[in-house]
Image (cartoon, rainbow, N blue to C red):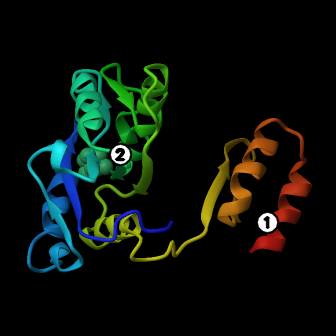
């Protein structure tokens, strides 16, 4: 990801239904021990002042209107940092009646409203360590490179593949539409491993 920000990155922290586990780790990333401010990253009190929004927790149906309002208030180009398994995909609450899910479900709603999908960085973990949160924010800031290859899981066949980022969308599409066989998937995996 190239840097969108040549100067400092201001982050608005929004709890969208978190158990507070992720929130304490976000605050930890800004304490003197991790000192996010040395990288020009600081927390701000209003989404109107922010370049990025750090979401923690699954998006609850109760929080949804406020989340949309906060996202709309962040000026373009905006970045979303989805912190924790809940924000990434709903986590253990993904099928709860009161929960919409992770950010991708939020983006479907935004699309219907004609709101552009923001650049998103995913920081999984329950909760993620402050170092991981800082890494995710710096990834958004364009100060570090993506370290790991992306992973995809094929549930039905219990196959885990390590695929380079460029290939992942194409392979995923093909696998989902069953255009390629398991054998072909394994061949691709052995090439990119
Ligand atoms: S990812 Fe874990 S720590 Fe974070 S909000 Fe969800 S349950 Fe809590």
Relative horizontal placement of residue 123, taking residue 53 as reference (left or right): right
Q: Residues within 10 Å of mark 1 (few under 14, many from 20)?
A: some
Q: To which residue does mark 1 refer? A: 189
Q: Which residue is mark 2?
A: 76
Q: Earlier in the sequence, mark 1 or mark 2?
A: 2
Q: Position of residue 70 (x, y in %)?
A: 23, 35
Left or right side of 4 for 23: left
Kindly state the secondary structure of the residue where label 2 is placed: loop
Quadrant of the snapshot with the C terminus? bottom right
Say what secondary structure mark 1 lies in: helix
Q: Residue at image x 41%, y 68%?
A: 139
Whole-percent x and y of residue 134?
29, 70
Q: Residue at x 29, y 29 (%)?
A: 68
Report the front residue among 129 and 109: 109
Quick check: 40 above or below 67? below
Q: Tell me the distance, in whole angstroms, between the alpha carbons under discs 1 and 2.
A: 38 Å
């Amino acid at each position: 990801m190239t840097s969108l920000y040549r100067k400092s990155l201001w982050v608005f922290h929004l709890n969208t239904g978190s158990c507070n586990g992720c929130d304490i780790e976000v605050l930890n990333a800004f304490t003197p021990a991790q000192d996010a401010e040395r990288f020009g990253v600081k927390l701000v009190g209003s989404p109107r002042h922010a370049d990025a929004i750090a979401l923690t927790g699954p998006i609850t149906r109760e929080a949804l209107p406020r989340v949309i309002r906060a996202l709309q208030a962040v000026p373009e180009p905006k970045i979303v940092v989805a912190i924790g398994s809940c924000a990434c995909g709903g986590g253990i609450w993904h099928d709860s009646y009161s929960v919409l899910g992770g950010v991708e479900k939020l983006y479907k709603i935004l699309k219907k409203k004609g709101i552009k999908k923001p650049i998103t960085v995913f920081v999984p973990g329950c909760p993620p360590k402050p170092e991981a949160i800082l890494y995710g924010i710096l990834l958004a800031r364009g100060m570090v490179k993506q370290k790991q290859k992306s992973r995809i899981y094929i549930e039905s066949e219990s196959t885990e593949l390590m695929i380079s980022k460029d290939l992942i969308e194409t392979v995923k599409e093909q696998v989902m539409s069953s255009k390629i066989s398991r054998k072909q998937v394994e061949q691709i995996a052995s090439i990119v491993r």
